[in-house]
């Protein structure tokens, strides 16, 4: 779909949830990186592919790993908005600093003209109803580095997420409304 070999609409698959569709990736995505590198117009190509189905969707979410790969550069360049998920630990903090530097570099080159909607701390460790000191300190540090970028409610580390995914249910369906709250806040930011 990304190289144009298949029409965009033919690469979109329904899920069991109303109004949620996926464009799955496979190992062929690595070939697309080579295609993007040789074309020199990656962000334009990605925008063009999604323009073909723009009337069908309110949002297109692109999930890429935080790196300086051609795929990440293309996705950032094609995006109007960015959400940055960050592990609530030291490794995550280092990744956040790198990501913010990367986005600033791209903005200075006018390769990213979008807006960062927020930072989403995840794998935030809690013991019972108490956040661990490490999680609390790292989220405070995120606030310091983020400047004006909002820090959204953290996503707790919990086996309940895996259980919900395996069962194809929402967390609230499993009696875990408190764990679902951060996702509801993300939806509000997108709206």
Image (cartoon, rainbow, N blue to C red):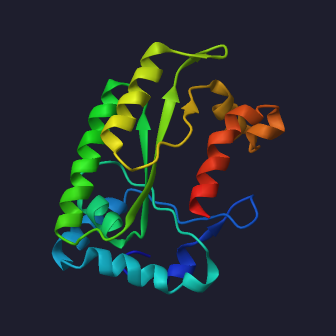
Quarter of the picture containing the N terminus is: bottom left
56 to 60, vertically: above or below: below
Tell me which residue sits at (71%, 67%) in the image: 19
Q: Position of residue 45 (x, y in %)?
A: 33, 80
Q: Quadrant of residue 126?
A: top right
Which residue is found at the position 20% from the left and 79% from the top? 39
Q: Residue at x 77, y 36 (%)?
A: 177
Vertical position of residue 80 compared to residue 52: above or below: above
158 lies above or below 27: above
Image quarter of residue 162: top right
Q: Please tell me which residue lies in front, 139 or 27.
A: 139
Residue 135 lies left or right of residue 18; in this view the side is left
Looking at the picture, how far across and down is residue 116, in whole percent?
40, 57
Residue 68 % position (x, y): 22, 53
Q: Is residue 5 visible?
A: no
Residue 143 place in picture, x, y as percent: 39, 37
Q: Is residue 116 left or right of residue 145?
A: right
Q: Please tell me which residue lies in front, 8 or 90.
A: 90
The residue lying furthest to the front in this view is 148
Q: Residue at x 41, y 38 (%)?
A: 86
Left or right position of 43 against 26: left
* Residue 76 visible (yes or no): yes
Query: Quarter holding the C terminus?
Result: bottom right
């Amino acid at each position: 779909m990304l190289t144009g070999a298949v029409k965009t609409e033919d690469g979109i698959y329904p899920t069991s949830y109303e109004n949620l569709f996926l464009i799955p990736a496979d190992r062929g995505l690595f070939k697309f990186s080579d295609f993007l590198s040789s074309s020199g117009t990656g962000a334009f190509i990605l925008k063009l592919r999604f323009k073909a189905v723009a009337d069908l969707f309110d949002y297109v979410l692109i999930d890429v790993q935080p790196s300086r790969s051609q795929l990440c550069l293309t996705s950032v360049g094609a995006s109007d908005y960015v959400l940055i998920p960050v592990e609530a630990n030291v490794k995550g903090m280092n990744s956040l600093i790198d990501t913010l530097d990367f986005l600033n570099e791209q903005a200075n080159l006018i390769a990213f003209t979008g807006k960062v909607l927020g930072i989403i701390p995840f794998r935030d460790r809690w013991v019972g109803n108490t956040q661990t000191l490490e999680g609390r300190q790292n989220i405070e540090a995120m606030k310091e580095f983020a400047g004006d970028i909002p820090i959204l409610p953290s996503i707790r580390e919990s086996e309940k997420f895996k259980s919900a995914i395996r069962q194809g249910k929402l967390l609230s369906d499993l009696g875990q409304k408190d764990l679902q709250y951060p996702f509801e806040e993300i939806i509000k930011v997108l709206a």
